[in-house]
Amino acid sequence: MAVAYSVTPELRVKLKKPFGVLVQGTFSETMRELRGIAEREKPPVVVGVGDTVSRNLQEHDVSAQLLITDNLRRRKRIVPAVFSARNVVHVENPAGVITEEAVAAVRSALESSALVHVVVDGEEDLLVLVAVLYAPEGALVVYGQPGEGIVVVRVTVEKRAEAVGILKAMEIVRKAK
């Protein structure tokens, strides 16, 4: 497992703020809002990052191409969810870093036309940045904002540049492919 990027203490504070639009409410309310956004915008891809978000996407019939989970909720082990993905990829990605293995798995999943479930041994939070980097323009990357709701990131040229800026601000341990 080769680490590509590592979070600096300064970035930890910045990354706690929503990287997209915060949709507040209960699971049902946020999924109803997300379904409405997806119906209006018809994104080429929807990516779910996080166990709760991924479960809710599936339970509320929001079609995702990529689900990224770590079998943790608020740092506590949970029973793994069963998703309809035929392609399941396991990667190592410790907390506070992005590994080359995780980058490759997300990139490959987004190049596929099938639903892919990436199961992370470690932490999946930072993979939102990788998903924004490799998802097609117009895609929606969705993750949870604990205690508040979900964050919906619309992939645009500007949002991709912002993700690149954050990655460049991280400590580059080894250049990712």
Image (cartoon, helix red, strand yellow):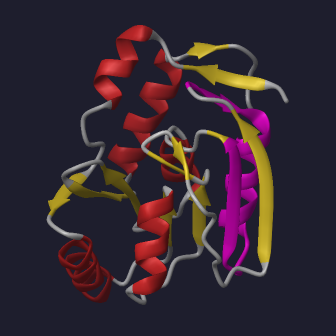
Whole-percent x, y for residue 135 in the image: 54, 60
Counting the numbered discs, the total is: 0
Closest to the observer, 133 or 26? 26
Compared to residue 21, the image places residue 44 above or below, namely below
Image position of 90 (left or right of 119): right
Assign the C terminus to one quadrant of the image. top right
Q: In which quarter of the view is residue 152 placed?
A: bottom left
Q: Residue at x 39, y 50 (%)?
A: 157
Foreground pick, 147 / 76: 76
In the rendered structure, which segment of residues is drawn in magenta? Answer: 96-121
Q: Where is residue 136 in the image (x, y as percent from the top left)?
A: 52, 64
Instruction: Report if residue 138 is visible in the image.
Output: yes
Residue under the image location 65 percent in, 77 percent down: 82
Residue 156 vertical placement versus 93 (above, below) = below
Question: Magenta span has 99?
Answer: yes
The residue at the far left in this view is 24
Q: In this view, does 164 lie to the left or right of 40?
A: right
Q: Can you see residue 177?
A: no
Q: Is residue 57 magenta?
A: no
**Residue 28 position (above or below residue 124):** below
